[in-house]
Amino acid sequence: DEWLPNSENTYQFQSHYRNPNTGEANLLQMTSYIAGQRVRQDFPQIERSVYALSSDPVIMRDGEALETEDALLVDNLFFDVLQFPLVQGDPNTALSQAGTVVLTESEARRIFGDESAMGKTVTMVAGSTTVDYRVTGIARDVPRNSHVRFKLVARFDPATYFAEQPDFLTSWGWQSGWYYF
């Protein structure tokens, strides 16, 4: 992903540790939510960060359930850190609020057909939770050789999303998302 602007100053935080029982090395691209929070706290020179959590919600469109793949839930300005180009919307503000979503060009066509997706609502269902997201940007389709895969990037509030599992936000054992600085 060296083609992305500022790629030389953008880093993915990874977890590397040894299992204390077996000695086996665990080398993960993913890390816990708390790890990134602590890194930001301990290194104030970090200018920007974003946590990205993979998700596979169902999108409801006109009463029809559409499967999704390559969906990311993010806690901050994803396109400010990983500067994938948008064809519509402002990358600096598109995900400034929870409840907003950026779709790729192909995902916007899949969901909305020939209609403009900008400003429309996407209803996503994950487990027992249903959330409406307002489309605030359209991104170019991600190149196949990118290490980041997404067809939609939705801004969520981690505290609300994990209200029934609050230990997700504070436990070092949940290796389930990616931090970028």
Image (cartoon, rainbow, N blue to C red):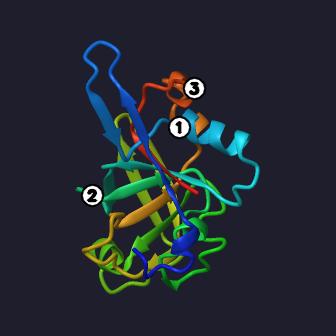
Return the residue nearer the eye: 166 or 101. Answer: 166
Secondary structure type for disc 2: loop
Which percent across, then down, holds residue 6? 57, 76
Q: Which residue is labeled 2 in the image?
A: 68
Query: Is 97 above or below relative to 3?
Result: above
Q: Earlier in the sequence, mark 1 or mark 2?
A: 1
Q: Which residue is labeled 3 in the image?
A: 170
On the rendered structure, is 113 left or right of 53?
left
Q: Are marks 1 and 3 in contact (CB under 8 Å)?
A: no
Q: Residue at x 28, y 20 (%)?
A: 23
Name the residue furthest top.
Answer: 21
Q: Earlier in the sequence, mark 2 or mark 3?
A: 2
Badge 2 local density, few (<14 within 10 Å), some, or many (20+)? some
- How many discs appear? 3
Q: Earlier in the sequence, mark 1 or mark 3?
A: 1
Quote the CA–CA distance across marks 2 and 3: 28 Å
Name the residue furthest front.
Answer: 23
Quote the CA–CA distance across marks 1 and 3: 7 Å
Return the residue nearer the eye: 67 or 171. Answer: 171
